[in-house]
Amino acid sequence: MTPSAVSKRVVADRLDLIDSYLREIRSLPLGNRTSFFADRRNVWSAESCLRRSLEALFDVGRHILARGYGSGVSEYKEIALRLQEKGVLKETEAKLLTALAGYRNRLAHFYHEVSTEELFEICTNQLADLEIIQDAYRRWMKEHPDKVDSGL
């Protein structure tokens, strides 16, 4: 795979999607456990938006690796490792993204093991983890304009 320019538009679109999904989650009644569980649609909305946010986060990482470095990666946890190796993520951010990869895999493949209570706790207390990775991607884009295509 030959490196080329990372598409600023692709990255921005995916990060905007994540922002939108996180707003949706935060619009749910997360401040009141009883209210949250009173309507099952809250659980399904939270799960869908969280899973889509994670997918978009990994799509951005994969795009940066493929276009910016010519590195093809298919495993989610490997994306985090390669992003750290290339200097896109700091070690702590890569560890966080690795943990998020594990959770994404649980949502996709072991969905029957993810309790509604666990989902509530994650949506209540850990959404900022996704924003940490978003900020790292934004930081990398600003620090590496030579690797970014700003065109439409």
Image (tube, helix red, strand yellow):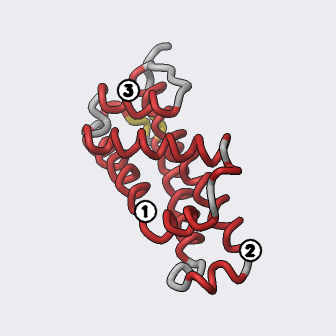
* Residue hosting label 2: 40
Q: CA distance from mark 2 to mark 1?
A: 21 Å
SS type, badge 1: loop
Rendered image quadrant of residue 146: top left
- Res 14 label: none
Q: Reading the chain from its start, which is encountered first: label 1 or label 3?
A: 3
Q: Is residue 5 visible?
A: no
Give the percent coordinates (x, y) of residue 136: 32, 47
Q: Residue at x 53, y 65 (%)?
A: 22
Give the percent coordinates (x, y) of residue 21: 58, 63
- Comparing 47 with 151, the one in front is 47
Q: Reading the chain from its start, which is encountered first: label 2 or label 3?
A: 2
Number of numbered labels in the structure image: 3
- Comparing 94 with 99, the one in front is 99
Say left or right for 98 vs 152.
Answer: left
Nearer mark to the viewer, of 1 and 3: 1
SS type, badge 3: helix
* Residue hosting label 1: 126
The reply to whether the C-beta atoms of the residues labelled 2 and 3 are less than 8 Å apart is: no
